[in-house]
Amino acid sequence: MKIKSKLLFGIGLLFTMITLLTFLSTFYVNKLSKESKNILLDNYNSVEHCRQMLNALNNGHQNEIEVRNFQKNLLLQQNNITEIGEKELTEMLTSDFAVLKNKARDSSLLKRVQIDITDIMLLNMQAIVRKDIKAQHTASTATLWIGFTGAICFLIAFILLFNLPGNIANPIKKLTDSIKEIAAENYSQRLHFETQNEFGDLANAFNTMAQKLEEYKTGNLEKLMMEKRRIDTLINNMHDPVMGLDENKKIIFMNNVALKITGLKAENVIGKPVQNVALGNDLVRMLVQDMFSDKAIDSNKIPIKIYADNKESYFEKEIIPIKIIPTGEKEEKLVGNVIILQNITSYKELDFAKTNFIATVSHELKTPISSIKMSLQLLENETVGLMNGEQQTLLESIKEDANRLLKITAELLNMTQVESGSIQLVAKACDAKEIMQYAIDTNKTLADKKNIKLIFTTAENLPAVLTDKDKTAWVLTNLISNALRYSHENASVKLGINVLNDKIVFSVSDTGQGISTEYIDKIFDRYFRIPGSKKEGTGLGLSISKEFIEALGGSIHVKSDLASGSSFSVMLPIEKI
């Protein structure tokens, strides 16, 4: 909307509002006059109470019913005192009536009570007349002044409506045209306003700006070249490989480290399309392949192995899109990309060392733990000797700890296999029911111990699932074990197998404590345990399960509500015939 149109709309609205204000003010002042009359109802009520009291006296002040009626109206009058002197008259009436009740036959007292009532009525009637005259005068005065003020406002709005928009919009239009000339690099453009107001100051400021821009244009090129050399030096002194592309994917710079690891020369690549360079260089092709892929592939965080510094080095790729909002526009525009390779070789070497250490320690721990379990089995054999109750309890505790240690070492070994890539998975057609039944039988003892019912349902005529039987059984055993651990005693855990499209879906659902929403995305992270959880574990089971299932071409999902339980589902492909 043009500024002139906006001003016309604004002033027109102001004109409408002032007119409406005049009308509403007159309307509500008249209404105020009517409402002021309603205030007089207090006086009318007093008159009515007095009339009722006179009627009670006339109907027989010795009659008990009439006395109660008199007292009722007297009480109402005592609570409706609004005028000066009315309180004293009411108190006098109360006093005289109290004496009259004791001397009911005294006609002079009766006459005095009647006079008291008449005085109260006269006082309120005089007040009614006085307030009515005052309210009518106030309303007439207010109506006159508001009408006069409304007429003045109408006149002012009418003048502004026809003069102000043009006075403001015309200089702004001249300023806009001059700014367009400046945007077209016509820095000789100047503004001249004859008026010495804000527009005159604006013209002086604009002319000063145009003059400085004209001077800046002549000396700007040298400064830009200096800044470019400074940036080039900064990029070339970076220890990580960096490559920059423009919006057309042409190479605009490559620092010395990037040229070294790619084996290229600057004069052969700068200014050339990166796809042409990638045709003859495998490393460049690997770096930019995601930018030309139709699929949304996020490989930025996958380490890249490159032979650099006379050894195999690992780099983490990051593609940073460069977006700016061009001058005079409102939407962002892509002007290029920067590819940075961060050298993570030292971190990778530490990770390898950690993995090897965990694998070695875990492997060495399995032998003594197995010996401990064998010794425990011998102790349980009654032919060796009988044990008392305390010894049996101690034996069970040692047995549980040994099993827990064995499970932890197994999880650590599985994790090291996943990290080192040495895990052996053999996917073949398997019976889904058989795998689930094995997991159920493995956890049967724990379920019976907590009196938890395992409810297993399955679809009919299930097709064979394409998976590694042992690894899948390990995953399901881990999921059922978790469900039992986090379920209350005498609860139930639901297990199921169904077909969804071309997938077999294994499900494990419990009614335990559930998982808070803030931790749902973290439970598959290595070593993660929910804060405050009292259950023991390494925090590796779900992470390893996810690695196994995804390596088999499947996926694992979880749905959970805090205090309502959790439901895990494992999806694996069906064998294709």
Image: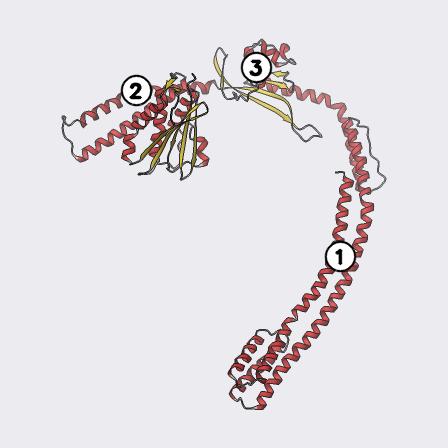
Q: Mark 1 points at which residue?
A: 22
Q: Distance between the residues labelled 2 and 3?
A: 44 Å
Residue 258 is labelled as 3
Please name the amino acid that badge 2 sits on: Glu
Snapshot quadrant of residue 51: bottom right
Residue at disc 2, secondary structure: helix
Residue 364 is labelled as 2
- Camera-nearest residue between 518 and 61: 61
Work out whether 24 lies above or below 228: below
Residue drawn at (17%, 26%) of the image: 381
Locate the N terminus and report the quarter of the image it occupies: top right
Residue 437 is labelled as none
- Horizontal and vertical percent position of residue 73: 56, 77
Cβ atoms at labels 2 and 1 below 8 Å apart: no
Please name the amino acid that badge 1 sits on: Thr
Residue at disc 1, secondary structure: helix
